[in-house]
Amino acid sequence: MALYCAIGGVDKELTTQELSGLLRDALEQIDPRNRVLAVPPDITRLHSQAGSLTCAAHQILGDQLKAILPALGTHTAMTPKQMDHMFPGVPRELFKVHNWRTDVETLGEVPAEFIREVSEGKVDFAWPAQVNRQICSGEFDLILSIGQVVPHEVIGMANYNKNILVGTGGRMGINRSHYLGAVYGMERIMGRADNPVRAVLNYASDKFLRDIPLVYVHTVVGRDENGQLAVRGLFVGDDIECFHRAAELSVKVNFEMVDRPIRKAVVFLDPREFHSTWLGNKAVYRTRMALGDDAELIVLAPAVREFGEDKTIDSLIRKYGYHGTSATLKAVEQNEDLAAELGAAAHLIHGSSEGRFKITWCPGELTREEIQRVGFAYADLDEMMELYNPHTLSHGWNTVRGEEIFFIANPGLGLWAHKSRLQ
């Protein structure tokens, strides 16, 4: 087991050139690397710096980089335009598409007894360790799993083996891991490197990924005093120490404690990244522990045009809506279609305020009727963008027409909480 790079700090600012140099130094320590597969995230993690690191890997490795497999999970495949934007200069023919319903192999199973124990009896099913066939094909002598460690609603802290076992995972593995996290309670998980979902993935790593030549490349990304992106750390290694080092820094960089509960939050969703509520509900996940009772969350979503990234999931969201844990669990018990797609059920739980605060969506392309039908409030995007201009608001507390609001330019970069909501 090896840690090839561990550079970072809350005040560190790594440039793209420095990241490339650190990656080069790390790769020079790894042998062999004649047939390399890179597994970065997709455009929904644009700010992770995984794009520039994948470009650097292409420059460093040359013909040794044989393929790039974006870890789509359940997301829609990247368009050529998105690939050119996130991975400029990288030949399109290197890119492969992961289909979570068809392109997977099951390597083994985490037993139900283990999951029942770590979930405190909340779920009682086995979990299949599924990965894209190329991961386990034996075709590659090095697989670079590239991504950002940041607080996450399903896994506590994103990345490490999640990028492989969920990002290139299969239908049942993704559904059950998401459901486990939702039923256990996302507010008990977010910002924590150790939790039941991670324990299941770690079990699978130890048992089923040990013969796969995986090396993890983890960034930690925050914002500087001017609100601009700043890369605070790079960690490269082949075991859990790499992840734990990055997670420790991420908690310091990405976990923001507010001094009082937020009464009104305004969250902007970058149109280059967010086009569904499946993705955009990060606005709900990442702010919920900072929102006071009876608060309002306003989501400015100029490119949101659908609920699910997948047609089946989209239809389930439209059918069952975001009505809280008890309503969703009851729907799972009574309806085979939702029981067969537990990832969708988990999302419906994650995206609900449980009636504690109001969620107002301002989408670019979904109608008032569509938004209200799934349980959200609706407001006109143009009117709200004029009132809460994301290009002039500062991150954090602002006063707009005499009203105090808390503005967040990208919910994917952090986790916000007030001490009254921490468990």
Image (cartoon, rainbow, N blue to C red):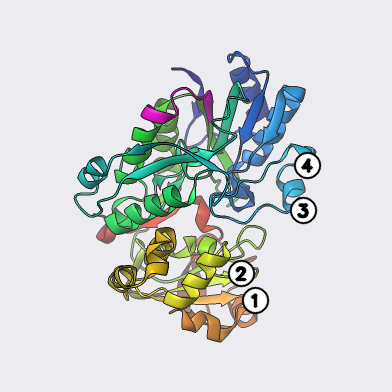
**Mark 2 surroundings: few (<14), some (14-19) or many (≥20) residues within 10 A:** many
Residue 212 lies within the magenta run: yes
Residue 237 lies within the magenta run: no
Image quadrant holding the N terminus, namely top left
Whether pointer 4 and pointer 2 mark residues with C-beta atoms closer than 8 Å, the reply is no
Quadrant in the rendering for residue 410: bottom right
Marks 1 and 4: which is nearer the front? 4
Q: Earlier in the sequence, mark 3 or mark 4?
A: 3
Residue at image point 36% right, 38% down: 109
Q: Amino acid at mark 2?
A: Val
- Disc marking residue 81: 3
Q: Which residue is mark 2?
A: 304
> Distance between the Cα atoms at labels 1 and 2?
6 Å
Whether pointer 1 and pointer 3 mark residues with C-beta atoms closer than 8 Å, the reply is no
Q: Earlier in the sequence, mark 1 or mark 3?
A: 3
> Distance between the Cα atoms at labels 4 and 2?
26 Å
**Secondary structure beneath disc 3?**
helix
Whether pointer 1 and pointer 2 mark residues with C-beta atoms closer than 8 Å, the reply is yes
